[in-house]
Each structure stands twice: as C-alpha cells, then as structure tokens.
Image (cartoon, rainbow, N blue to C red):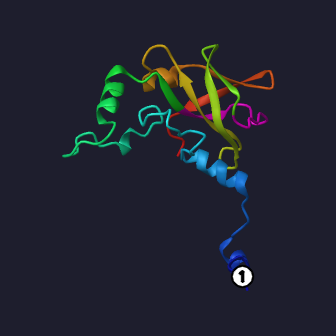
Amino acid sequence: MTLYEALWSVGPEFALRDAGYYTIDALRIEAGRRAWGAELSPDESPWEAGLAYTVKLDKSTSFVGREALIAAREAGVRKRLIQFTLDDPRAFPWGGEPLLMNGRAVGELTSAGYSRKYDRAVAMGYARAEAPIIDETLLAARYEVDIAGERFTVTPHLNLA
C-alpha cells in the first residue's frame, strides 16, 4: 500500500479530500505567501514585497545589502505587492493581467486563483507609482483589472488571512 492509499483509506474519517495544484495555489494566495518567480525575484526588495518583518537591520554584524536596504527604505517605496479579491464572483484572472489604480495602469497581477473561502477569485500584484506609496494610499485607491479587454473592479488587501 502506498502512502497516498493509506491516507485515502482513512480520509473519510477526517473529511480529507484531494486537492490539486490550483487549489493549493489559491490557498497560497489567500495566505499571502509569495512565490519565487511570481511575487519574488532579485528585482523586488523586502519593502516592496511586504516582507519588512523578515529584515533585521540592527544586527550586531553587517550584512551584504544592508546599506542598500536602508537607503531604499528611507527613499520610500514606489512599488508594492497587494492582495486583491475580485468584486465580481464571475471574473477569473490567470495572472499577468494589467492592474489599474484610479484609472491609470500601474502594474500587473502576479498570481491568481479561485478562493472557496471568499467564493471568488483572489490575486496578488504589484502597483508602481512615481511617489512613495504608503498603506493608506494603497487601500484608499480604486482598482480594476483588465481581463481580456473587460475591466473588473477589485478590492485591495494588505493581508487577507
């Protein structure tokens, strides 16, 4: 008997069900977990990716990139990762769709999936601006996603979970 078969044989007792890649990815997006190659790359700083809590600048020893991170933080972040729920439960992005903030193209969705919890699509994407972006500005803006030429409104979140 394989491990899968053993788990599946007791599955009904624990209400276990199979889950595919798309389900797992949607759960990742709901939880705000960033994926390498989608939300994370050498081009994103921890400040941009919403991972400031992972950086300890006041270590007793220096580390490569410390001064660059301090300078970037002091200059203000002009690119931010945001989570979204699509307002129309019928809308379904796949990732890569243009993101509009207050009617202006500012970025693209990096990941998207269908959330059973929210009964609609959830997504993550980066918004870029010419001036530093703060949380209040991000949350007060009006967002749309262009899916195949049709615009759908989305609600921004800094943390869905």
**Magenta-colored stretch includes residue 65:** no
For label 1, count other residues whose C-alpha is less than 10 Å away and answer few (under 14), some (14-19) or many (20+).
few
Residue found farthest to the front: 64
Indicate the position of residue 42 as horizontal and vertical percent values. 49, 37
Position of the N terminus by quadrant: bottom right
Query: Which image quadrant for residue 70?
Result: top left
Query: Which image quadrant for residue 88?
Result: top right
- Along the viewing direction, whichever of 141 and 93 lies nearer the viewer: 93
Indicate the position of residue 151 as horizontal and vertical percent values. 75, 21
In the figure, is residue 30 to the left or right of 74? right
Q: How many marks?
A: 1
Q: Residue at x 50, y 32 (%)?
A: 43
- Along the viewing direction, whichever of 68 and 22 lies nearer the viewer: 68
Residue found farthest to the bottom: 1
Residue found farthest to the left: 60
In the figure, is residue 47 to the left or right of 114? left
- Along the viewing direction, whichever of 117 and 70 lies nearer the viewer: 70
Q: Residue at x 59, y 46 (%)?
A: 30
Q: Residue at x 48, y 33 (%)?
A: 44
Question: Looking at numbered disc 1 in the image, what kind of residue is underneath it?
Answer: Thr
Provide the residue span drawn in magenta.
82-95
**Magenta-colored stretch includes residue 85:** yes
Compared to 16, does 7 lie above or below? below
Main secondary structure found in the magenta portion:
loop
Indicate the position of residue 59 as horizontal and vertical percent values. 23, 45
Q: Secondary structure at mark 1?
A: loop
In the figure, is residue 63 to the left or right of 46? left
Q: Residue at x 22, y 41 (%)?
A: 58
- Which residue is tagged 1? 2
In the figure, is residue 33 to the left or right of 88? left
Indicate the position of residue 136 as horizontal and vertical percent values. 44, 23
